[in-house]
Amino acid sequence: MRFDPRSLVDVAVLVAREAGSLALTTRETAVADVDTKSTITDVVTAADRAAERLVRERLASLRPGEPVIGEEEGGQAAVEGLTWVVDPIDGTVNYLYGIPHYAVSIAAQVDGESIAGAVHEPVTGRTWTAARGGGAWLDGRKLQVNDVTRLDVSLLGYGFAYRADRRQRQAETWAKLATKVRDIRRAGAASLDLCAVAAGRLDAYAEHALGRWDWAAGALLAREAGAVVKVPGEAPELGEDATFAAAPGIADALYAALVDAGFAKV
Ligand code: LIP
């Protein structure tokens, strides 16, 4: 491999923490300057934009010549070599409402595969990291998914899309699932949902319509912690834009239950 994943993790951690500090310290003014994107509920604050700008400037300095794909400014992946994938504030609605559950997510990808990632929580100071083949970590503690084997005692994370018509169909699907699992949690930040699977705080997570920036770091973390992970395009039976992560003991049963509940049709 032409890149050392561990050194890439160090870069991701350094820059994510700087961007997180900016988001945290500017929130009062940042949430006064809000625009919308795909729908009236799909918001972007001044802090989303400023944090991504900071990340881009720091990566240009630390990793010159390597392209960045970010939620707010877009970008193109490298034809050959490494691309940085950035969500400057994952959980923007939480950030807007003052709910302290949001993160800066930065991943390094080669040919679309994540090889290093960091998910940093500005409010708690926690930083989740993974290097391909090096395991998943939370502030120096190694992570492992749960050894759960029964779907009916599993805790599931999920998320709704921003489009109202799709939310209706998603709600109908989750209503069918609600009696098949222990309970369901909707926390509002995909990167942290995937980290929660890695840490055993969730047994599984599934959602549609995530951006690459939402899952790029968290999916690597979940996979390195032992989860069965499908990123968009890898689980056609769940829908072409489905993201799925589950402890191995329930992965097959959950996958089948999602198919039965019509997850692919939402
Ligand atoms: C969010 C995701 C969340 C999803 C939201 C939104 P953002 O990302 O983390 O899981 O349900 O609709 O996409 O927009 O806060 O970066």
Image: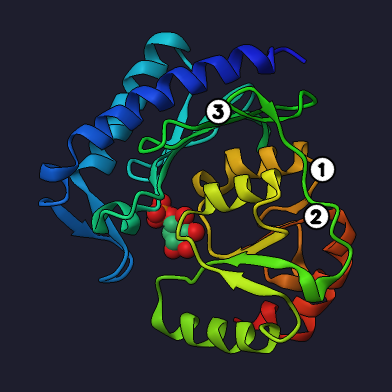
Determine whether 38 is above or below 126 in the image: below
Q: Quadrant of the C terminus?
A: bottom right
Contact? badges 2 and 1 (CB < 8 Å) = yes
Q: Indicate the amino acid at tag 1.
A: Gly
Left/right placement of residue 129 relative to residue 203 reads left
Mark 3 / mark 1, whichever is N-terminal: 3
Tell me the number on the disc at residue 208.
Answer: none
Mark 2 / mark 1, whichever is N-terminal: 1
> Which residue sits at x=34%, y=22%?
18
Secondary structure beneath dot 3 equals strand
**Where in the figure is residue 34, as x and y percent of width and height?**
17, 55
> Which residue sits at x=69%, y=44%?
198
Q: Viewer-nearest of labels 3 and 2?
A: 2
Mark 3 / mark 2, whichever is N-terminal: 3
Q: Is residue 87 visible?
A: yes
Determine whether 27 is above or below 13 in the image: below
Secondary structure beneath dot 1 equals loop
Determine whether 40 is above or below 22 in the image: below
Q: Indicate the amino acid at tag 3.
A: Thr
Q: Quadrant of ligand 1?
A: bottom left
Q: Which residue is mark 2?
A: 247
Tell me the number on the disc at residue 83.
Answer: 3
Tell me the number on the disc at residue 226.
Answer: 1
Separation of disc 2 and disc 1 at Cα?
Answer: 7 Å
**Where in the figure is residue 203, as x and y percent of width and height?**
73, 59
Separation of disc 3 and disc 1 at Cα?
Answer: 25 Å
Separation of disc 3 and disc 2 at Cα?
Answer: 28 Å
Left/right placement of residue 90 relative to residue 146 reads left
